[in-house]
Image: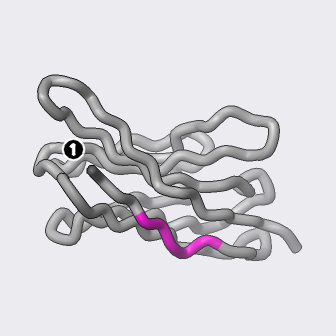
Amino acid sequence: QVQLVESGGGLVQPGGSLRLSCAASGSIFSINTMGWYRQAPGKQRELVADITNGGIINYADSVKGRFTVSRDNGKNTVYLQMNSLKAEDTAVYYCNLVQVVRSLQRNYWGQGTQVTVSS
């Protein structure tokens, strides 16, 4: 079993910053990808950014240059630094971990944390 616990969401004004954290625990393998997805009301869940254990990073075009994903492998924790936030960034942000278990790819999700960008 894998548990993901997110923290750091909240209300921020446009142009502001927030930092999300997600700590993973349980049966974590050294080779994995951790990242962040978001889902706004009435929209599908979408990838925001992810990072492999080796440091390969992928960003959605909409957040490039504003968001930074990072991780601490020793703590099994992934972070999302969000700067220059816009109203369209408002969503529930979900932490995600992907790893291969017995030749099968497994996806794990956190409970989600609300990010609201509003004046």
- The one nearer the camera, 92 or 65, is 92
> Can you give x and y, in whole percent of width and height, for residue 66 in the image?
56, 59
In the picture of the structure, the residue carrying the numbered disc 1 is 32
Looking at the rendered structure, the number of numbered marks drawn on it comes to 1
Residue at position x 29%, y 53% in the image: 2
Residue 77, image quadrant: bottom left
Instruction: Determine the secondary structure under disc 1.
Output: loop
Residue at position x 19%, y 50% in the image: 53
Residue 92, image quadrant: bottom right
Residue at position x 44%, y 60% in the image: 68
Taking the image as shown, residue 33 lies to the left or right of residue 117, namely left
Q: Compared to 69, does 99 lie above or below?
A: above
- The one nearer the camera, 23 or 12, is 23
Q: What is the span of residues highlighted in magenta in the rendered image?
A: 5-9
Residue type for callout 1: Asn
> Can you give x and y, in whole percent of width and height, for residue 45 in the image?
62, 37
Taking the image as shown, residue 105 lies to the left or right of residue 65, namely left
Residue 62, image quadrant: top right
Most extreme residue toward the right, as rendered? 119
For the stretch drawn in magenta, what is the main secondary structure? strand
Quarter of the image for the C terminus: give it: bottom right
Q: Compared to 33, does 78 lie above or below?
A: below
- The one nearer the camera, 113 or 47, is 113
Residue at position x 30%, y 40% in the image: 98
The answer to whether residue 12 is magenta is no
Most extreme residue toward the top, as rendered? 103
> Can you give x and y, in whole percent of width and height, for residue 116 in the image?
75, 65
